[in-house]
Amino acid sequence: MNGTTYIDHLAHRYGVQPEGQLNPFISRHDGQLYLDERICLNALAEQYGAPLEVSYLPLITKQIHQMQTYAAAARTAAGYTGAFVYAYATKANFAEEVVRTALQSGAHYETSSAADIIIAHQLWRQGVLPADRYMFCNGSKDLGYRKAILALRDAGHELLIPIVDDLDELAYLSSHCHVPMQFGVRVRFDIGDVDPDHPGGERFGLTHSEIDSAIAMLAGTQHRIVLYHAMVGSQIEDAHVWKIQLSAAVERYAAQAHKLPSLHMFNFGGGMPTDSYQLDFSFDCQAFLQTLMTALADACAEHGVAHPDLVGEFGRYTVGSHTVYLMEVGAVKAGRGGAPDWYLLNGSLMVSLPDTLIVAGQQFIILPLDEWHLPARPVRLAGRYTCDTDDFYPRPGQPPLLLPNGGEGMVLAFFGVGAYQQMLSGRGGAHHCLTPEMRRVIIEADGDQLVVRETPPQHLSDIMSVLGYNNATLDLGSRRDMQTAERTTVRSFRMPVKRSARMWKRTRPV
């Protein structure tokens, strides 16, 4: 790039400076890259090496509280009298520490499967899921999912709301539940109203005539329909388009609530965009919520009904930013025919970042930990731990990735990996080309301290066992000895917290 440094590139492309805040959760001070102004990623890379997964749970709390603040301001500005209900869509990340943090931060619960309900049932019995939290049950419900819903409702969870995806679900649940059950109905959008980038969403929900049938089915029973669900897409960054797609649903809700007094919740679904994936991200969440609340208030006034409680299901928004992968460039290989050179990573992109293959145009924020003073050049990233031609990034049609001309030994930070990546690639077991899972460091708040929990990298013997190989026949060394060696190479944890006198506690590796 004619001698343009990486710092110059960032300033020109994103308008950010080499020191200070890069986006709401990434900053750089004294040449060191920080997560949420507290966690020095350079220090963690020096401490643990790479590849490394860093999960910083206080960012989940920050996201939830920020959206609740936006909603409170929007309610005031719109004169909106309905409550705001923030639900965490657990399918984005099922990890225990993630779900627990979201609940402790005030989130309600949204499920998508029988296993999800079983987890929630256990958390409710343990008191982790408070009794005053709603549980919204989405998705197509097979027999196992239906029975899990009934078991939780029969056990006494009163704020359980199955959102009906077809009339068979409603018939089964309403006839087998011996106590009053609250239901939601999800509207099935017409083809032209569905986000073309997410056409799979068209299959969910009930047509308008089926919603009328659902109301008729419950008439005269102990059960009630209380929620109207309108889900139009995912990561919708154009608020005007979102408003247009929701406008018909807002009007239909108000008209339906006039005929059905039990209906008092409007669920606009997921799709709230997040700043996890682009340094130059821009979306006014508060303005969007104010626009939606104003539209609901106007429709309700026209039909003479109360403002509904407004429900949002936040998956990517809740957890996308809390996890970072640190991966090292293990080798550099020249491109062919004028194509950019390859930075070959000691890891696998298609295993660690499956959304690069699954979601068209998916981008991630990728920043080097150091060497920002070097000239920038276009490169392609590829995983060394697979032998697969699809294991590269950026994908075809995406803009080139510019990084410092540093090459081998450079450590890159991949942001925005906290949602869906592990849920899609799986945790534990065997991955593509037997790529081992990286060391994991989990950091969570405990009062004024940060507690650090460490999981060693996946051992080859564990992978072989899952695949059915007899470890005794393989020269893998002693699993116990290998793990002990891993642990003893880790030095005492230092405090990579910017300008903070807070102490760290460290738990034993798990």
Image (cartoon, rainbow, N blue to C red):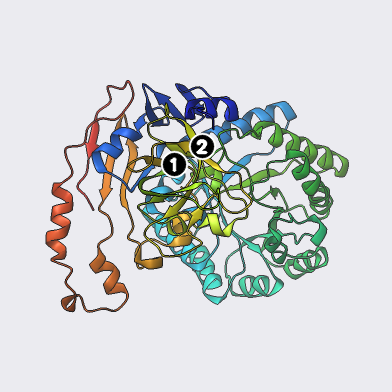
Dot 2 falls on a residue whose secondary structure is helix
Q: Position of residue 167 (x, y in %)?
A: 71, 72
**Residue position marked by numbered label 1 in the rendering:** 322
Q: Is residue 120 visible?
A: no
Q: Position of residue 89 (x, y in %)?
A: 54, 52
Q: Is residue 276 left or right of residue 351?
A: right
- Cα distance between the residues tagged 1 and 2: 9 Å
First-in-chain label (1 vs 2): 2
Q: Position of residue 411 (x, y in %)?
A: 36, 40
Tell me what residue is drawn at x 57 percent, y 74 percent.
Answer: 142
Q: Quadrant of the N terminus?
A: top right
Mark 2 crowd level (few <14, some 14–19, many ≥20, 10 Å Cα): many
**Residue position marked by numbered label 2 in the rendering:** 63
Quadrant in which residue 202 is drawn: bottom right
Between disc 1 and disc 2, the foreground one is 1
* Of residues 294 and 339, the one drawn nearer to the viewer in this rendering: 339
Asked if residue 406 is positioned above or below residue 4 in the image, the reply reads below
Q: Is residue 500 left or right of residue 271?
A: left
Q: Is residue 335 left or right of residue 310?
A: left
Tell me what residue is drawn at x 67 percent, y 43 percent.
Answer: 310
Q: Position of residue 416 (x, y in %)?
A: 49, 44
* Of residues 412 and 490, the one drawn nearer to the viewer in this rendering: 412
Asked if residue 99 is positioned above or below residue 444 in the image, the reply reads below
- Given the image, on which type of amino acid does mark 1 rest? His
